[in-house]
Image (cartoon, grey):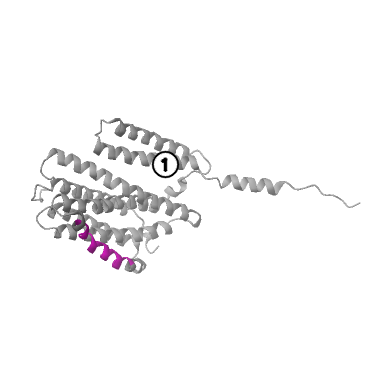
Amino acid sequence: MPRRHPRRQAPARRVGAEAGEARFDLTGGVLLGLGAGLALFGITQAQVAGLAAPSCWGSLVVAVVAVALFGWRTVRVAHPFVPPALFANRAYRSAVAVAFLAMVVNLGGLVFVPLLVVDVNGLTPGAGALVMIPAGIAVALVSPLIGRLADRIGTRPLVLAGLAVVGVFALFLSTFTGGGSVVPAGAGIFGLSVGFIFVLTPLISAAAGALPDGQAGAGIGILQGAQFLGAGTGPALFGVLVTARQQSGGDAVNPLYAGHAGAAYSDVFLAMAAVTVLALAVAFRMRPATQGA
């Protein structure tokens, strides 16, 4: 009689183990999304209903709890939604922080320059949108050149130069907009948009080059998430500032601003310049080794 061999069960158990290792941390993702979403909602409610409104402080409290639970879970589960090893890399940490701060300023400019020319200069919304067209054309023309520049001089110098341009034009907007002409507003958003492109494109390359192959996919996903979070945070925070300054009716904080009607917008653009200075301080910590990545 032929000898019968028992079945081997090890491969099935191995497949099960690999499936367990590949599990997606849905709970961690929900906690992070809940914290970020409620934080943004609470900030916008501060603008609409005030800080004392339950919809404002309640959302912010729940957001803090959700983020705290997310951090607690991240360091305790085997495969967290955001791998902690990513943030052990100094260059990557800097890239994520700069991406967030730069997007705060960029989206703030894209939102509040049109509001400025409509609210202060008296343009219609359609005419106000025309102020943004030169900036969009410039970005489309400059973008293809940035990759070649990064290959020649490295990513870090481009990021620093781009942030410097963003800061200068944010200060320009704070100083010269709100008068009888919309030309300063158009020139300001032109420079701010071009400077932002010089930041973002090399930053993605720097972040990808700073990570091992096994972490690059997750790392770029988190970097893009930081951009989206900055895109929501900027208009929300600056909207609260505009509302507060319009209600107070005081003069602009910037002593170089000569107008009065647009003082609230001057303060918003000055705040954008301050955020850019913070981003520059973080970008200086990016290791030169990320250049040419």
Secondary structure beneath dot 1 equals helix
Q: Position of residue 211 (x, y in %)?
A: 45, 55
Q: Position of residue 239 (x, y in %)?
A: 23, 44
| Location of mark 1 (residue) | 32
- Residue 203 falls in which quadrant of the image? bottom left
Residue at x-position 13% and y-position 38%: 248
User: Picture coordinates of residue 167 (x, y %)?
Assistant: 22, 55
Magenta segment, principal secondary structure?
Answer: helix
- Residue 123 is a magenta residue: no
Q: Who's the residue at 15% across and 41% down the image? A: 246
| Front residue of 151 and 259 | 259
The residue closer to the viewer here, 25 or 254, is: 25
The span shown in magenta is: 128-143
Give above or below for 65 relative to 134. above
Which part of the image, by quadrant, shows the C terminus? Answer: bottom left
Q: Work out whether 247 lies above or below 140.
A: above
- Which of these two is toward me, 74 or 125? 125
Q: Is residue 284 visible?
A: no
Q: Note whether 249 is above or below 203 in the view shown.
A: above
Residue at image x 18%, y 59%?
186
- Amino acid type at circle 1 is Leu
Query: Could you say which quadrant of the image residue 162 lies in?
Result: bottom left
